Amino acid sequence: MSNILIVDNEISICMLLRKILRKQGFTVDTALSGSTALRMLKETAYDIIFCDYQLKDKELNGGMLMNSIHKLHPHAAVVIMSAYPNVRVAIRMIKEGAYDYLLKPFSVAAVLALTGKIINDTKYPLKDERPLSLNHNDQYVYGESPVSKELYHQIAMVAPTNYSIIILGETGTGKEAVARLIHLQSKRAHQPFIALDCGSLSDELASSELFGHERGAFTGAATERKGAFELAQGGTLFLDEITNLSYPIQTALLRVIQERVVRKVGSLKEIPVDIRLLAASNENPVVAVARGAFRLDLFYRLNEFSVSVPSLRSRLEDLPLFIATFMRDTAITLGKETGHFSAQALACLRNYSWPGNIRELKNVIRKACLLTTDVPECDITSLPEEIINAYNPVTMAPHRLPATRNHLRIKAGKTALPKIMVTKKPAGDNKTKAAGALHLDRKTLCDKLQLPDTLS
Ligand SMILES: Nc1ncnc2c1ncn2[C@@H]1O[C@H](COP(=O)(O)OP(=O)(O)OP(=O)(O)O)[C@@H](O)[C@H]1O
């Protein structure tokens, strides 16, 4: 098992991290100063070092210690911790080779996710047996909302078992991310995780992708190929968009699940397979069964347990956490400070229904950060039209938004009011007309817009 060094002046942080990581089976040492850490590092090769940026040593900060660590142990992963959210320092540390930047106070989940990510990263050859790289660079964000907590509770319960699981949820809610979590929390975590999107596969391709093929099995099969079942041997196979598979492929799949052997296309040889199956679907499989598109017996085989991933709109409490993480990740990727969203932009994001869920949010944040230059704030002009329009359908299209924001009279911070974003212009300077368009009486409109209720 890997060994970890915690370097922090605060004994409480050292103790907390040590407790969390020891529970996971890691060997953990602690150092209350950079100079002690350096002495320990000369004697022991640690795999992961959690190091506070603000060390109390004279003339030694976390960045300097990290540089020494890299000279002594080039393959160690260094995580810089800090109690101060300083994007500039975070970017510099990542550029200088830190694995990640962890803000204090941190949650247990964040520490575990980060450690799991390092263990799965082939760039860091830890001494213990390493699971196959999950090719998953993004940090999993653990929400704090009740529906998120319920999701993690279910995952924690079912992950260590060998149950087949159907993961349900709207598009972009993070079904594949949940499948990866289940794998990482299972006894198979050190074995492969293979994901296959069944959504767009023709029958021929689906057979070959799932079961593999022999050389010459069909036109174009120039070489022999392993299928997903064989590739996932000993580990977890995640089949996305399962209800989109054709009936004949479902039948073949059912046979493999029942008999636990797979036959490559064009081969008679049976290969025993030991895999755990996870499947996902945007469509409720019960509905797919009812419309005759999904085999009931296959559904029963896969549905030993089911997990529902909540939509983003049902976990809006988690929105600030997702936004902060995606902004920080984007800042690091772009290598620039991205500031923060203005109160008005945040109100827009909060009001939107997010049909594309976390994937859509991530794209919106990345784009907004890219568009925001030379200003400390991402304002609503950096948001897509549909989000601004959803905020208030009668607002002007974004490209017609006035250059100066003085025309936007809303005080977005006042959450009881923020549904209005009009200028005096759209209704021809007529407050009565504007109020009518918003289904408000004139006085309420004037109050909300902080305008004098005089004729205009
Ligand atoms: N909890 C999370 N923390 C951070 N990123 C997340 C989280 N959940 C999902 N994502 C990100 O959102 C995007 C969509 O996630 P994912 O592909 O798992 O969704 P999905 O439900 O499987 O999508 P689809 O329905 O299209 O198959 C990915 O970029 C993923 O990294």
Image (tube, rainbow, N blue to C red):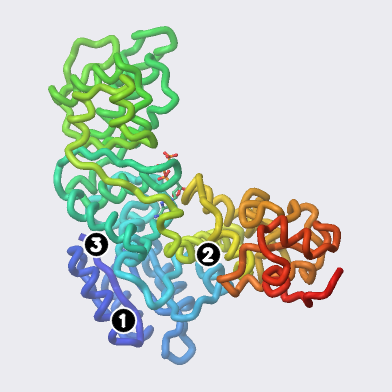
Q: Residue at x 53, y 64 (%)?
A: 328
The local secondary structure at tag 1 comes to helix
Residue that mark 2 sits on: 328
Residue that mark 3 sits on: 2
- Which circle marks residue 161 in the picture? none
| Horizontal arrangement in the rendering, residue 55 relative to residue 400 (left or right) | left
Residue that mark 1 sits on: 13
| Horizontal arrangement in the rendering, residue 33 relative to residue 323 (left or right) | left
In the rendered image, residue 366, in percent from the top left (x then y), is placed at 59, 55
Please count the marks in the image.
3
Disc 1 residue crowd, few under 14, some 14–19, many 20+, Cα 10 Å:
some
Specify the amino acid type for callout 1. Answer: Ile
Residue 99 makes an appearance in the image: no
Asked which quadrant contains residue 418, the reply is bottom right
In the rendered image, residue 92, in percent from the top left (x then y), is placed at 56, 70
In the rendered image, residue 320, in percent from the top left (x then y), is placed at 48, 66
**Which label lies toward us, 1 or 2?**
2
User: Are the residues tagged 1 and 2 within 8 Å (C-beta)?
Assistant: no
| Horizontal arrangement in the rendering, residue 313 relative to residue 234 (left or right) | right
Q: Residue at x 70, y 68 (%)?
A: 445
**Which label lies toward us, 3 or 1?**
1
Please state which of residues 366 and 129 is positioned toward the viewer in this rendering.
366
Specify the amino acid type for callout 3. Answer: Ser
